[in-house]
Image: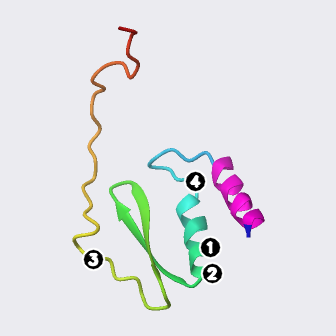
């Protein structure tokens, strides 16, 4: 089991995924979850792919309150992400 988790982690880290291009990470996770018995629903919000997984074979109903798509608008950076020391 540990080897499978490590292999999945390595497969995900190898993919050049930067939002909104997930490089197939959502698809890979969805396939693995489905194989483990989860019902998976793929969701799209703006340019970003997400997934909702529920344990069990029923279709994964996505509660409205749980997932609200608010597509982000590009913003200007507010400044440097680095702070200068004291």
**In the rendered image, which residue does mark 2 sit on?**
35
- In the displayed structure, 12 sits above or below 61; it is above
Secondary structure found at label 4: loop
Question: What's the magenta region?
Answer: 2-14
Q: Determine which residue is flagged by label 1.
A: 32
Q: Circle 1: is it few (<14), some (14-19), or many (20+) Cα within 10 Å? A: few
Which residue is the extreme one toward the right? 3
Q: Are marks 1 and 2 in contact (CB under 8 Å)?
A: yes
The span from disc 4 to disc 2 (Cα, nearest Å) is 20 Å
Callout 3 crowding tier (Cα within 10 Å): few <14, some 14–19, many ≥20? few
Please identify the dominant SS of the magenta region.
helix
The residue under label 3 is 63
Q: Residue at x 28, y 47 (%)?
A: 72
- Between the residue at mark 1 and the residue at mark 2, the CA separation in whole angstroms equals 5 Å
Disc 1 element: helix
Q: Which residue is mark 4?
A: 23
At a point 40% along the width and 9% down the height, the residue shown is: 85
Ranked by sequence position, the earlier of labels 4 and 3 is 4
């Amino acid at each position: 089991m540990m080897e499978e988790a490590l292999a999945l982690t390595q497969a995900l880290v190898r993919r050049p995924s930067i939002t909104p291009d997930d490089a197939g990470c959502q698809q890979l996770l969805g396939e693995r979850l489905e194989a483990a018995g989860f019902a998976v629903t793929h969701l799209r919000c703006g340019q970003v792919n997400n997934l909702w997984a529920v344990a069990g074979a029923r279709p994964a109903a996505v509660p409205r309150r749980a997932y609200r798509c608010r597509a982000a608008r590009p913003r200007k950076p507010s400044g440097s992400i680095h702070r200068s020391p004291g």
